[in-house]
Amino acid sequence: MFNPIKLLFRPQGEQPISALIVMSIVMMLLAPWFLLSGSGGLVDQWRFLENSRAVTVTVVEVDSRDSDDIRVYRPVFEIRKANNKKHRFAGDLWEYPPAHEKGAVVTGRYSDESGEIWSNKMLQSKKNFNYVFIASGLGSVLFGCFLLIKIRHRMRLSGQTPKYRL
């Protein structure tokens, strides 16, 4: 079984450089995906905040589903519009534990443009999720750089000449 930790910390002459090169390429390819996903989510959230207004939101039901080995939950929000019509919205963010109980009245935001309703607590969860993606992207970049430096060091010890400069 492939174990990247053992691969990184083997004694000097035993470590295959090609495996380190593959690992560094994978990390560098993952980094932009994480960074773009996280930043795109933050930009979408900022747009929502700009185009929405504060409202009082009622949680009319809490949907649930099985995900891997746990049950995740999604609140269904409802507001009354100016014309006294009800508007419901169930977002795409499933969480464990549930963010709200059925019947809870919470503060949130509503966008006339998109029809989305989010509670302030759910908005914070979305923001935290995007920060995790950004941090994962930065971690991938740093780990990829660490691997490239390690490759260069291993090549010097084995008498090979690196084809790039840092």
Image: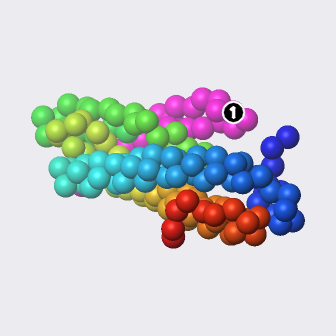
Boundaries of the magenta span: 54-76
Residue name at image x 71 percent, y 48 percent: 19
Residue 55, magenta (yes or no): yes
User: Which residue does the image show at 63% across and 64% down from the upper left?
Assistant: 161
Residue to which mark 1 is pinned: 68
Q: Position of residue 77 (x, y in %)?
A: 37, 39
Q: Is residue 16 left or right of residue 48?
A: right
**Residue lying farthest to the left in this orientation:** 83
Which residue corresponds to the image point at 72% horizontal and 54% vertical from the top-left? Answer: 17
Near-viewer residue (101 or 135): 135
Q: Position of residue 101 (x, y in %)?
A: 52, 45
Q: In the figure, is residue 49 to the left or right of 74?
A: left
Q: Nearer the viewer, residue 40 or 126?
A: 40
Residue 57 x, y percent position in the rendering: 33, 46
Q: How is the image coloured?
A: rainbow
Question: Mark 1, residues whose alpha carbon is within 10 Å: few (<14), some, or many (≥20)?
Answer: few
* Residue 55 in sight here: no
Q: Secondary structure at mark 1?
A: loop
Q: Quadrant of the N terminus?
A: top right
Q: Position of residue 35 (x, y in %)?
A: 43, 53
Drawn side of residue 70 relative to residue 65, left or right: right
Query: Observer-nearest residue: 136 or 26?
Result: 26
Magenta span contains residue 144? no
- Tell which of 16 and 118 is nearer to you: 16
Q: Is residue 158 visible?
A: yes
Magenta-highlighted stretch: main secondary structure?
A: strand
For image coordinates 70% across by 69% down, the residue present is: 156
Quadrant in the picture for residue 162:
bottom right
